[in-house]
Image (cartoon, rainbow, N blue to C red):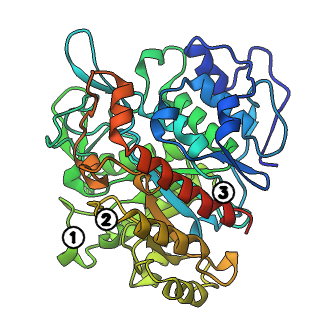
């Protein structure tokens, strides 16, 4: 069992119940009939499918708590959310064979026009909580791990949606300025702090049988450091204060319950293969990044963390010695036997093993649904034994297809609202594919249905 209810201290309230309280909801939970109508059951594993995201995103956080409790894997229905939640336990090396599913929490935030005509973007973390019931939980032998696209404020226009093609990149971040207004609900921060909101998210994901992590950037010119008494300055890896700020910011997040960090541009750390580098600015030296990864593990006291490197394939010893668990993009997963052969070849590499991509953050669309389903199939079935599995990386679009005229990379670079009536509901309805998206989601569920008991 991954979680349990502990005796409560007098006056203590766990962060999930604190969130409900901050939203003026009661903490007593009840069986959710909508969830029962849409649930997929694979042994003790349950989730909802044959859905479009708007059906979940339009529900309340209380509805989602009822849904997650209805899907509870241990067969019990707790009237209130348990106090102590343990992460799914797959040992210290779980990250080597996990499926990483990146959720663009900014894209699914509440897009609306406020009373003074501003196009605001808020509460992306709560929206991600609402999607949790529709994400397949981890299997018997390997974990599914959610990666959040945004944690820190983006440099330009944080907290606002923009015109469809106006750049507002998630790849440019601010440090020393808290967390993104796109993500955190600051309207209730006096009742539940940003850190507690992240902890509540992690507890909900763990309860549903998922690991969690976040994307980070390491290109110096894509990071600004906010100075309290002056203008923002560009991050400098040779500035000890900046270096410590980066390190401590990431340790802080790990201490909130995250267990994985996806490192953008990791292949090029230390100046490696710079002819193919597409980031902006200097990267940390090999020794600096090695130290950062070591210190995050050491100072957090967590031995089971997973560090995933973007495109960190080729010189596997280089990335293993850096402290990474896996890297993306080693081979294309279109051919089942190719993937299986690689999985068998690296079956004993449990400190570091290469990974594959169903799609990545630079995905411009264009693949058919059948191609995506085939790549997912190969990523979760192409091995001799489940313990041989290669890590895989996929995007929100691989579970919940986007509308025809946008793509994953566009939503990383821009932050449009697709609302036709200035409401969040309309944005959610129009961001994703509709009837064909529902049918695709059903087919993805069929694949995971057969995989989760392996």
Of the pair 85 and 92, the residue shown nearer to us: 85
Of the pair 366 and 264, the residue shown nearer to us: 366
Residue drawn at 18 percent across, 77 percent down: 275
Mark 1, secondary structure of its residue: loop
Q: Quadrant of residue 431?
A: top left
238 relative to 231 in the view: left or right:
right
Q: Quadrant of the C terminus?
A: bottom right
Q: Is residue 393 above or below residue 115?
A: below
Query: Which residue was labeled with disc 1?
Result: 277
- Give the percent coordinates (x, y) of residue 210: 63, 50
Query: Which residue was labeled with disc 3?
Result: 138
Q: Residues within 10 Å of mark 1 (few under 14, many from 20)?
A: some
Which residue occupies the extreme front position in the image?
Answer: 435
Asked if the residues shown at circle 2 and circle 1 are in contact, with their CB atoms under 8 angstroms apart, the answer is yes
Q: Residues within 10 Å of mark 2 (few under 14, many from 20)?
A: some
How many numbered badges does the structure rendering display? 3
Depth-wise, is mark 3 or mark 2 nearer the camera? 3
Work out how far the residue at label 1 is from the one at label 3, CA to CA, in angstroms.
34 Å
Work out how far the residue at label 3 is from the one at label 2, CA to CA, in angstroms.
27 Å
442 relative to 87 in the view: left or right:
left
Query: Which residue was labeled with disc 2?
Result: 265
Residue drawn at 63 percent across, 84 percent down: 347
- Please say whether residue 323 is visible from this viewpoint: no
Mark 3, secondary structure of its residue: loop
- Please say whether residue 340 is visible from this viewpoint: yes
Badge number at residue 249? none
86 relative to 378 in the view: left or right:
right
Of the pair 163 and 93, the residue shown nearer to us: 163
- Give the percent coordinates (x, y) of residue 253: 50, 43
């Amino acid at each position: 069992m991954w979680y349990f209810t502990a005796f409560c201290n007098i006056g203590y309230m766990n962060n999930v119940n604190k969130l409900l309280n901050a939203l003026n909801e009661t903490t007593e939970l009840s069986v959710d009939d909508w969830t029962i109508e849409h649930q997929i059951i694979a042994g003790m594993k349950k989730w909802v499918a044959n859905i479009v995201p708007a059906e979940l995103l339009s529900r309340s956080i209380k509805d989602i708590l009822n849904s997650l409790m209805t899907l509870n894997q241990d067969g019990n229905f707790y009237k209130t959310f348990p106090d102590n939640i343990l992460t799914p336990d797959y040992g210290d090396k779980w990250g080597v064979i996990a499926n990483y599913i990146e959720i663009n929490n900014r894209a699914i935030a509440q897009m609306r026009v406020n009373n003074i005509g501003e196009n605001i973007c808020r509460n992306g973390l709560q929206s991600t909580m609402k999607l949790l019931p529709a994400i397949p939980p981890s299997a018997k032998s390997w974990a599914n791990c959610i990666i959040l696209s945004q944690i820190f404020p983006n440099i330009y226009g944080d907290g606002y949606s923009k015109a469809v093609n106006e750049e507002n990149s998630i790849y440019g971040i601010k440090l020393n300025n808290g967390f993104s207004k796109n993500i955190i609900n600051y309207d209730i921060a006096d009742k539940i702090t940003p850190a507690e909101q992240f902890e509540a998210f992690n507890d909900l994901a763990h309860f549903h049988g998922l690991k969690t992590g976040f994307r980070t950037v390491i290109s110096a010119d894509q990071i600004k450091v906010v100075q309290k008494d002056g203008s923002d300055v560009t991050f400098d890896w040779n500035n000890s204060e900046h270096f410590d700020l980066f390190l401590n910011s990431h340790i802080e997040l790990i201490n909130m319950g995250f267990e994985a960090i996806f490192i953008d541009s990791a292949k090029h750390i230390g100046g490696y293969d710079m002819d193919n580098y597409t980031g902006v600015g200097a990267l940390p030296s090999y020794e600096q990044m090695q130290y950062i990864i070591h210190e995050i593990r050491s100072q957090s006291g967590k031995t089971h963390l997973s560090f995933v490197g973007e495109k960190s394939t080729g010189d596997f010893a280089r990335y293993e010695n850096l402290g990474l668990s896996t890297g993306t993009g080693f081979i294309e997963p279109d051919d089942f036997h190719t993937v299986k052969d690689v999985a068998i070849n690296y079956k004993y590499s449990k400190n570091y093993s290469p990974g594959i991509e169903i799609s990545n953050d630079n995905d411009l669309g264009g693949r058919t649904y059948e191609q995506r389903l085939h790549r997912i199939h190969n990523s979760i079935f192409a091995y001799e034994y489940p313990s041989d599995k290669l890590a895989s990386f996929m995007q929100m679009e691989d579970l919940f297809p986007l509308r025809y005229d946008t793509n994953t990379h566009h939503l990383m670079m821009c932050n449009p609202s697709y609302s036709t009536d200035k409401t969040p509901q309309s944005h959610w309805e129009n961001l994703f594919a509709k009837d064909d998206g529902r049918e695709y989601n059903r087919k993805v569920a069929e694949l995971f249905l057969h995989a989760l008991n392996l």
